[in-house]
Amino acid sequence: MALTGVEIFKLLPKTNCKKCGQPTCLAFAMKLAQRQASLDQCPDVSEDARQKLGEASAPPIRPTSLGAGAKAVKMGEEMVLFRHEKKFVNPCAIALEIKDTLAAADAAGRIEEAAASEIDRVGQRLRVDALFLSNDSGEPAKFLELAKLAAWKAPEMPVIISTQNPEAAEAALSQFAGKKAVLYGANAGNLQAMAEKAKAAKAALGIAAKNIDELCELTEKAKTLGIEDMVLDPGARSAGEILRDNTYIRRAALKKNFKPLGYPVITFANRQDTMLEALVAGLAVEKYASIVVVGSAEKWKNLALFSLRQNIYTDPQVPMQVQQNIYKIGEPGPKAPFLITTNFSLTYFIVSGEIENSKVPCRLAVMDSEGLSVLTAWAAGKFTASKIAQFITESGVEGELDQRELIIPGYVAILSGSIEDKLAGWKITVGPREANGIPAFLKARTA
Ligand code: SF4
């Protein structure tokens, strides 16, 4: 059971030294009880107290890795039910199902499709994160062939091995040594054997239960078998069941600190109807899945799911930003137009997209405005004439240009005179107010 704030307080040094960032030990204890702080923030806590508090300070949903290396996906560690309370921490993995009943060429094509799904959106690399290898044939030899193909074609991609046959599991897992795979398919009939295979391969164990009651029994048994890392499938398949069970599991883990359900959840959205699949996968992204299994990876669906996931897993209190820099769009020569905007990701994304649409090569200065859009940054004093002048001067872009002309957003036309005063020798031109006016504006200049 979780300790109360007062119980935690009794175990702290009670010196009120403030090293943890809180004014008193009691305030820190309350934060710890609400899981809004980590015990590591108090450098003076005794070893004895650390042990006793371990349970209280451990994340209610166990941190678990899917895969290893640069493409590894972190799961678990979530602390809240709603993202407006605090950021959701680890974006869910989207896993593409590949069955071992597919012809080798078709399976290879799907693996390549998943591996090539990566896109850049608002400065982040987004992709289908994992392969869900399914032993539909029931034959260990066929499953091993598929595992070999995946390990060869996409060696960096995390995998989930799906089978209920411990022999097939062992053979497939042998292809992913050291890659932190998930072995999915442990049930009431095979738990012990599957747990042994998972432990031997250092893989997390995916528990496939019929319902939440059985899931609790199985996770407790798996724990007694020495399994620490688990992924939970409560058996939900319809949208209603997924919403109900995923919410129940998250609530039980967070609000009751109920350890048998304190693990990442895998949700199956794979459907014949791809539109329905997109909708169910979207629900799973929003409602607490750590792995969402899909049956296909069309570009339109990827883009919808990637964007939704990105929105759900950004911090609503911190604007998304791109790095301050002078970005080249196309291959701008020394006479190419030179524009400036702020570093709010959406602003950058839209402005750079419209410049690309114009087909006119340009330089785009993106100035650090702490992630605010143009008008907000100007109103907040972060996009001012002196800051713009300083940024342009320090960027050294002048040496690349034949003409010193800077095009500013129409919304801050009021700044043109003062920028000219501060940027000696520069001509300031007022561009369109809205980004969608940029193509016509640029084309008119080059006509
Ligand atoms: S760092 Fe530890 S001892 Fe110091 S105020 Fe925080 S909880 Fe108390």
Image (cartoon, rainbow, N blue to C red):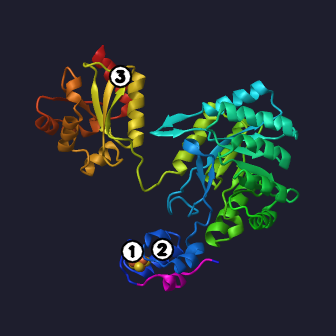
Kindly tell me whether mark 1's CB lies below 8 Å from ligand 1.
Answer: yes
Q: Residue 31: give its label.
A: 2
In x, y percent, where is residue 247? Answer: 67, 61
- The kind of secondary structure element at disc 1 is loop
Q: Which residues are magenta?
A: 2-14
User: Residue beneath label 1, please?
Assistant: 22
Q: Are marks 2 and 1 in contact (CB under 8 Å)?
A: yes
In x, y percent, where is residue 370? Answer: 33, 49
- The kind of secondary structure element at disc 3 is helix
Residue drawn at (77%, 54%) of the image: 236
- Asked if residue 245 is among those painted magenta in the image, a careful observer would answer no
Q: Which circle's residue, 2 or 1, is located before the other in the chain?
A: 1
Q: Vertically, is 185 above or below 97? A: below
Amino acid found under the numbered disc labelled 1: Gln
Kindly tell me whether mark 2's CB lies below 8 Å from ligand 1.
Answer: no
Quadrant including the C terminus: top left
Residue drawn at (38%, 37%) of the image: 348
59 or 294: nearer the eye?
59
Amino acid found under the numbered disc labelled 2: Lys
Amino acid found under the numbered disc labelled 3: Ala
In x, y percent, where is residue 94? Answer: 64, 43
Of the four image quadrants, the one with ligand 1 is bottom left
Residue drawn at (51%, 38%) of the image: 125
Quadrant in which residue 425 is drawn: top left
Question: Circle 1: is it few (<14), some (14-19), or many (20+) Cα within 10 Å?
Answer: some
User: Residue beneath label 3, please?
Assistant: 440
Q: Which circle's residue, 1 or 3, is located before the other in the chain?
A: 1
226 or 31: nearer the eye?
226
On the question of residue 113 being in view, the answer is yes
